Amino acid sequence: MRKLPEAQRMALTLCYDFDLSHEEAAYVLGIPGGTVKTNVARGKVKLRESLSAWAKNPDGSHRG
């Protein structure tokens, strides 16, 4: 999470750690709801990519 841009990290934190809706997070952050949705989606993609790369062995196989 620390490697994510701040906007993505904050959106993910509010929506997942604090269980706020996108609209509630938008209110807290003072940004449009669509921007929160975009930041959450982009942050999830980056996290998925990071975790996927971490979970692969040097030969390309997955750790199990």
Image (cartoon, rainbow, N blue to C red):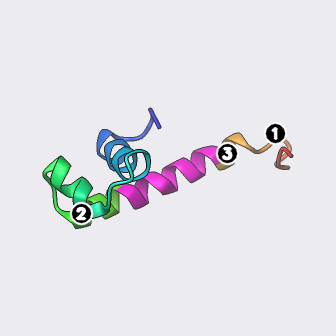
Q: Is residue 55 left or right of residue 14?
A: right
Q: Which mark is residue 23?
A: 2
Where's residue 15, x and y in %? Answer: 37, 53
Residue named by callout 1: 58
* Residue at the image point whose x is 31% and y is 39% from the top: 6
Q: Residue furthest top?
A: 2
Badge 1: how crowded within 10 Å, few (<14), some, or many (20+)? few
- Magenta stretch bounds: 40-51
Q: Say whether disc 3 or disc 1 marks the residue closer to the N-terminus.
A: 3
Determine the CA span between mark 3 and mark 1.
Answer: 10 Å
Give the amino acid type for the residue marked by disc 3 in the picture: Ala
Where's residue 61, x and y in %? Answer: 85, 49
Looking at this view, is 25 or 54 the one in front? 25
Q: Secondary structure under badge 3?
A: helix
Give the amino acid type for the residue marked by disc 1 in the picture: Pro
Residue named by callout 3: 53
Where's residue 11, x and y in %? Answer: 33, 50
Looking at this view, is 11 or 50 the one in front? 11
**Majority secondary structure in the magenta region:** helix
Q: On screen, 3 above or below 7? A: above
Looking at this view, is 12 or 56 the one in front? 12
Q: Nearer the viewer, mark 3 or mark 2?
A: 2
Determine the CA span between mark 3 and mark 2.
Answer: 32 Å
Q: Secondary structure under badge 2?
A: helix
Give the amino acid type for the residue marked by disc 2 in the picture: Glu
Q: Nearer the viewer, mark 3 or mark 1?
A: 3
Where's residue 16, x and y in %? Answer: 43, 51
Badge 3: how crowded within 10 Å, few (<14), some, or many (20+)? few
